[in-house]
Amino acid sequence: METFLHRIDEVGAQERVARLFSRSIKKESKIHALKTVLSMIDLTTLEGKDSPGKVKQLCYKAAHLHDQFPDLPTVAAICVYPTMVPVAKKALRDTGLKVASVATAFPSGMTSLSYKLEEVKMVVDAGADEVDMVISRGKFLQGEYHYVSDEIAQVKEACGKSHLKVILETGELVTLDNVRFASDIAMAAGADFIKTSTGKVSPAATPPVVLVMLEAIRDYYNQTGKKIGMKPAGGISKAKLAVQYLVMVRETLGQDWLTADLFRFGASSLANDILMQIVKQSTGVYQSANYFSID
Amino acid sequence: MNKREDVKKTYKLYIGGKFPRTESGRYFKWTDPKNSTVVNMCRGSRKDFRNAVVSARSAFSGWRSKTAYNRSQILYRIGEMLEGRRGQFMDELILQGASKKEAENEINQSIDRLIYYAGWADKYQQVFSRVNPVASSYFNFSYPEPTGVVSAIAPDEPSLIGLVSIVAPIIAGGNTVVVLASEAKPLCSITFAEVLHTSDVPGGVVNILTGYRSELLEHFSSHMDVNAIVYCGNVKEEIKFVQENAALNVKRPIVYTDENWLDKKVQDPYRILNTLEIKTTWHPVGI
């Protein structure tokens, strides 16, 4: 295990982030970046009070972001709780949009493996194209790395053809060293995507964490030739921050990763902020949330 | 021993309860009429304005939901704090060209105006509310609610009481405000921000920018998240421009021309009403 360990220089990571985030993206490049971000969003609703009506509304929004503006892309996927998968699947059937479901006792992951596998099979049978699982952070922090690894591998098997995103919940992993190690474990165990957070724990996706995970993906690609996707989630609600993340991806992993197949944003209110920016760029007038759909 | 160097104040903006420099990094030189002092004032940009609107928007729900009585107390508190800083305002008003007597009068009037609107803050609701006769089984009543975020172009002069006379009725009515200070005499506007900062006025309720009116008027009047604009001035083209831009999102445009701001006649509760919306409720009865 020790040979796996990458020590992360926290100060170095922060300085690299600061340097990348100082880039200024303006005019046409900005519009292009904003549209790219839109196409990468997993429009998310993960609340205990979610109803079929709310999910249907969100699905409609996913396919019709702002009909006053033609030429806008749709978001990449809808992300919901397991019981809402059939509703979302039905609402999105003619759109080509994907349905992602969280599983494995999201957000805590505190249940037995057999229940988790049952849950994964249930959402896959219901038609989920993507499964967002959580790792067992408690086991990870206790040093039971094999348990974490085996669990991911078994969930991957249960996913069948559906894509697996592995949520590390970096807010609970304490150090960047742990984030890197958890990323390495997840990729080696079969993750198609690694994802920062559930959105239920603070801090969620922070820039240094995302940078460390992107570097883990880069190193894994250099070693194995496999392209793993990345999904920062939680707390990304402003267009500016999202564009800064695109810069980070471009500079760490290259152009290949600037596609919804390999990079996603997990967000609920980000889409509206992006739309407000796009409308602002074309009309020259600052916008109000009153004139955009409620998420 | 060497002569001591005075420590001069850096005049900054007032946004969201903080005193940031302009994000644009631009400044304009302000010189007093006697050419004795030069001050670098922040030349606020459209992004400063945008940030201020974001602050004002997020402060709005908290401010409107305070009790009218509490808003009244806070306005009174602004008056108290202004009284305590009399000396500082005297110096600045005199530096801006006023005589000692004029400066004293302007400060007195400004304090009185704050107390006047503090008094009205928990009374205008009753005065402007009414029960309407309707020919069906409803209890029908109307009452005023705050309009929302208000942008305001303060009068060029007198610069202290002008600013106070604009801001006080807007916030008394439960609105939040982004105000552009006098371009010709901007010093005391930022010092007034220091008064607000120590008066229990929540951050973001009042935001004060300095800069060029010609540059910022477009953004003050066109921003879609601003619900009303108060314009003080006489320039016909500017008034037309403000009114046209306001139509974009049906902002309520309020124009004050040729006002004598030092006169008590310019204070009345209708100025609070100008940035209020009347809400009418039909309540079923006897069913």
Image (cartoon, rainbow, N blue to C red):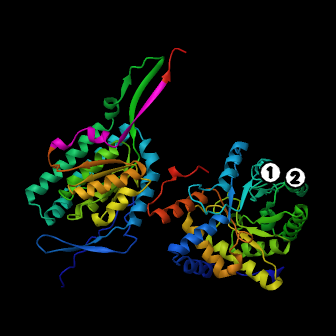
Relative image position of residue A57 (x, y in whole percent) = 67, 47
Amino acid at circle 1:
Pro
On screen, residue A86 versus residue B248, left or right, reads: right
The crowd level at tag 1 (other Cα within 10 Å; few <14, some 14-19, many 20+) is many
Q: Residue at image x 16%, y 61%?
A: B93
Q: Tag 2, which secondary structure?
A: helix
Segment colored magenta: B264-282
Q: Position of residue A113 (x, y in %)?
A: 89, 58
**Quadrant housing residue B128:** top left
Q: Residue at x 20, y 64 (%)?
A: B185
Tell me the residue that label 2 is attached to. Answer: A122
**Kind of residue at badge 2:** Met
Specify the label residue A82 is tagged with. 1
Instruction: Identify the mark nearer the N-term, 2 or 1.
Output: 1
| Residue count near mark 2 (Cα–Cα under 10 Å), binned few <14, some 14–19, many ≥20 | some
Q: Please say whether residue B270 is one of the residues in the magenta stretch.
A: yes
Viewer-closest of A166 and B232: B232
Output the chain of dot 2.
A
> How far is disc 2 from disc 1 in space, using C-alphas?
8 Å
- Secondary structure at numbered mark 1: helix
Identify the residue shown where x is 20% and y is 52%.
Answer: B161
- Tags 2 and 1 in contact by the CB under 8 Å rule? yes
The answer to whether residue B182 is seen in the rendering is: yes
Instruction: State the residue at coordinates (59%, 56%).
Output: A66
